[in-house]
Amino acid sequence: MKRQALFWRVALLALPLSVFGCFVVWPLLDSFYYSFTDWNGFDPRYRFVGADNFVKVATDRLFTNATLNTVIWMVLALLLPTLGGLGLALLLDSQVRGANVFKSVFYLPICLSAVVVGQIWVWIYQPDWGLLNTVIGTVTGEPATFAWLARPQSALYSVIVAWSWQQMGLSMVIFLAGLTAIPSDLLEAAAIEGATRWQRTRYVVLPLLRPATVVVVALSVINSLKGFDILYIMTGGGPFHSSDTLAMHMYNESFKKYKMGYGSAISVILFLLTLIIVFIYFRQLRKLDELHG
Amino acid sequence: MRESGFPRAVALAGALGLAGTFGSGGALAAGEVTISHYFTGELGRAGLEEIFGNFREATGVTVKDSPIGHEDFKTGILVRAAGGNLPDVFSYWAGARTQFVADAGNLGAIDEMWAARGLDAVVAKSVADGATMYNGARYLVPFGYHYAGMFYNTKVMAEAGVTEFPTTWEGFLTLCADLEARGVTPIALGSKNRWPAQFWFDYLLLRTAGPGYRAKLMAGEAAYTDDEVKAAMGLWRDLADAGYFAPNANADDWTDASDKVARGDAAMTLMGTWITGYWGGNGLKAGEDYDFFEFPAITPGVPNAVVGPVDGLLISGNAANRANAEELVAFLVSDKASQATWAKAQGALSPNVGVDEGIYTSVMKRALEAIGNADTFAFNYDLATTPPMAEHGLSMFARFMDDPSGYEGYLADTEEGAKEVFGK
């Protein structure tokens, strides 16, 4: 009986593990290997260069720029969807007329692929006839032609807004589920005690939303680390690297400048940074679990 | 030195999730040949379907094609090369890009096939000399080539009273000033994908420092901080400072800029002859709705160079259907009907000397004439210098279009890139 159970475990795990090993673990180890070479990505000949690629990172101004952009991306891609989703959830939970319609509408973007969302926002940001400049022009009475995605000072933030617009729906749904789980007698008791609406939200609702917040933050962190596609579609890291993140910089160095060795070194650094973030996150999660049983 | 093969292929494909995108290059029936190309535009694809049909009729061999968008192709084809998974035939740009692939040993030489089929008598010598030979062997079969010129909206120019087009820099500046004074934006440029800006750099440098100096710069034997480059960029900055370029160049791609000219929002754009294919597809008539003039001379005595790319066909080093691949590339350049179809569909000039000039529009005939009158045919920037260097340069052009005032600093940064690329 025990042998049969073991057989099935092995049999059922064999396929996913071999796929995981072949397409995740092997490339990962390969990246480590190539980060110590000067391989250009397609020439069968290459040399080992020791830690040169990692040393070079320290003097690469595009790497510094990409690191800063990655930090900005992660912070804003965490804050905006979380706060926006929370705001929407609180609003829609308070019995707004047509709340169900709004819930569907706000959730809809998450069903779209990043490519579609990116393209929609490229149109919105189009300087000559895009929705945003048209609205600004109509409101101010002055023609607006700012090129949101083509100016270095606004490109990254414009993509983050598009990203947050898509992700907000997911946060909203999770917070709404959390709100439904809050017993109404707690809120009624607080109201009888004289708590204002803001005080009820601040001291009753928000603390009880902590489990939902943990899930939202977890998803936002994980999704923001994966946020390459929308950036690729909307700016490709441009104009002239101003919206490069580490993932985009790695791509450009590897596949546009044909420095696969150096690109692999960047990917190793990105991997280690991600590992640290995930480690910190899971440690916090465990603490919370212990706290709440 | 180390050798590696399959593991890298898996690593790359797995890491990028590209494995499914490209399919497999091996195991084909004897009557088939695979090709990958970057002609994904509606007209180009329709033209190729017709041409591949001609090939099937003539040889009984079926072409299995996998088109990939122009920008993605640049990366995708090298990923396939890394995995030893190239198609039998693939389109590529003659010049430094082909050199890069040839250096890595990914290509199959075609000297024997070229001689056996007498392609010396088929392909124009001016194209064959500069585009087909790499490292002492012949690899590339030219399929079509282009010329970059100043394409303009004839109605806009007529309304502005322009009857003669400038042949000197002073004349060009006067034209821009006149158009500007009449409320017409003189120049549209769509540098969102960076490469359309390169023609400005190419022509300004070629017309001031000459083809010899430019060739040195492209090979890493001159510096981006040289006075010659600064002078060319200075002229470009003067145009930008005068407000002659339509705003937000980096927000537009080349078709947006072409549309601006077609609509009359701008008077002209510096672009390759493929614009005639694009405009033709939109119903514009050569000579009636649009025309072109040559980029004006700047420094007297500098040899007259024209700029453009050559679209070529390469056979991979490990082609599964080598014989069919040779048959296909030879057919594509030799079959006059197919070449004529391609010239019309893509707005390309045919490298086949036997193609009747009657197939061309009046504009294309003049382009051909301009090439014939030139002392040199130079590949445009991103085909003239190595791909890693081109990345630095193209970014510099986009940066320049955002804020031309800092161009000397951008050149210094580009030279830093050049030092690394060329090991200076």
Image (cartoon, coloured by chain):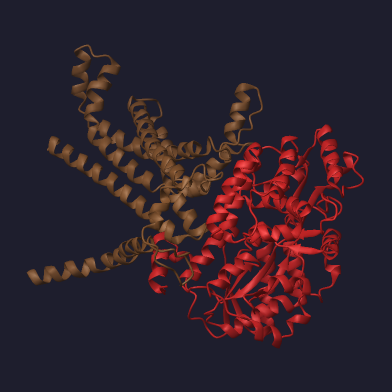
Whether residue B41 is visible here, answered yes or no, is: no
Tell me the quarter of the picture where residue B360 sits: bottom right
Residue A19: x %, y % from top left? 31, 66
Asked whether, in this view, residue B300 is left or right of residue B410, the answer is right
Which residue does the image show at 47% across and 65% down from the upper left?
A41
Which residue does the image show at 66% across and 67% down from the upper left?
B94
In front here: B404 or B416? Answer: B416
Tell me the quarter of the picture where residue A197 sits: top left
Residue B262: x %, y % from top left? 77, 46
Tell me the quarter of the picture where residue B71 sits: bottom right
Judge whether B11 appears above or below A65 on screen: below
In front here: B31 or A274? Answer: A274
Asked whether, in this view, residue A172 is left or right of residue B402, the answer is left
Residue A254: x %, y % from top left? 47, 58
In front here: A186 or A101? Answer: A186
Query: Which quarter of the figure is the N terminus of chain A placed in?
Result: bottom left
Chain that is coloured red in the picture = B
Judge whether B126 appears above or below B401 on screen: below
Which residue does the image show at 55% across and 38% down from the upper left?
A152
Query: Which quarter of the figure is the C terminus of chain A placed in?
Result: top left
Which residue does the image show at 57% across and 63% down from the upper left?
B68
Asked whether, in this view, residue A57 is left or right of residue A202, the answer is right
In front here: B146 or B215? Answer: B215
Whether residue A238 is visible here, answered yes or no, is: yes
Colour of the chain lettered A:
brown
Judge whether B102 appears above or below A93 on screen: below
